[in-house]
Amino acid sequence: MALPIDLVLVRHGESEGNAAKRLSEQGSHGAIETLRERHTSRYRLTKKGRGQALKAGEWIRKNFFTGEQYGFDRCYVSEYIRAMETAALLQLPCVKWFCDFYLCERDWGELHALPEEERWEKFGDALRMKRQEPFFWIPPNGESFAKLCHRVDRVLDTLHRECSDKKVIIVCHGEVMWAFRVRLERMSQQRFRELNLSEQKKDKIYNCQIFHYTRRNPHTNKLMPHAHWMRSVRPTKSPLWDTEWQEISRPRYTNEDLLEIVHSVSPTVQ
């Protein structure tokens, strides 16, 4: 079994929750207060988010719906409303979507829909612990990133079993796309921590950003048993933001490498 020949991941457009959180960080809490009584699965896209989905759809149609290999063989979408709205607004011709709850966004527990000041007042200690260990950290009554990776593994198992000779598109969420990155690129927890805490814009996953993984060598067209290449595109950015093809290097460690990682943590009990 192998992964799909092409696997395309799309983050949903800007949602009500995204917009409300940004406003709360700027000191305006009215929007996020209105979302307290609504489950995150019910968030719609904003006007901006709908426009982002349309732009992403234009790029996908241009790059995957021309020539002999037309479109996708399998299309998956998270069962959260904002992801389904994005999938529909991509306006991909002749597609039928499979809704999959394994693709739903990470559960943030009691941190859901809290104004920024209240979030830090109630859960400041927990949030500070997140900065120490974002991979294994669990939000209060929520889901760790490591646990999310287990959910993504269930999706990857299906793709290995049913889609090894196919092209697949998945519309999901930012944290879910990070989990795909970790599993597909065999990213270490140390590397995930660096990227998760990075302030660099290039290390973020933006609304309607696209990751394209492929087993086909983009230079020779030869098929490989694993997804060896990846590119990331932001169709909503002007001019278009595109990393171009990058070869994936899955890390392996010598004994010395492991000890270097170990010694980066100071012992507290002898």
Image: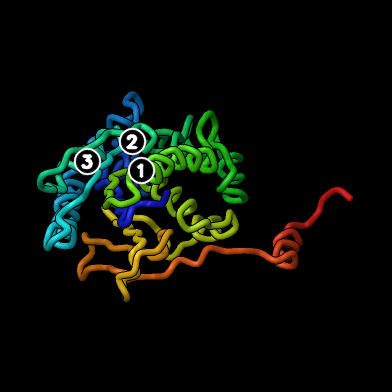
Kindly report which numbered mark, 3 or 2, lies closer to the viewer in this rendering: 3
Q: Earlier in the sequence, mark 3 or mark 2?
A: 2
The image position of residue 189, as x and y in percent, is 58, 54
Residue at 15%, 43% in the rendered image: 95
Describe the element under mark 1 as helix, strand or loop. Answer: helix
Q: Which mark is residue 262?
A: none
Contact? badges 1 and 3 (CB < 8 Å): no
* Residue reaching furthest to the right: 270
Q: Earlier in the sequence, mark 1 or mark 3?
A: 1
What residue type is disc 3 on? Leu
Q: Disc 3 versus disc 2: distance between alpha carbons?
A: 14 Å
What residue type is disc 2 on? Ile
* Residue 120 horizontal side relative to residue 173, left or right: right
- Is the residue 222 above or below the residue 48 in the image? below
Among the 4 quarters of the image, the one containing residue 81: top left
What residue sits right under mark 3 in the picture? 45
What residue type is disc 1 on? Lys
What residue sits right under mark 2 in the picture? 32
The image position of residue 115, as x and y in percent, is 41, 37
The image position of residue 77, as x and y in percent, is 27, 39
What residue sits right under mark 1 in the picture? 21
Q: Disc 2 versus disc 1: distance between alpha carbons?
A: 6 Å
Residue at 11%, 61% in the rendered image: 66
The image position of residue 75, as x and y in percent, is 24, 43
Among the 4 quarters of the image, the one containing residue 265: bottom right
Colour scheme of the picture: rainbow
Q: From where the camera sits, is residue 201 visible?
A: no
Q: Earlier in the sequence, mark 2 or mark 1?
A: 1
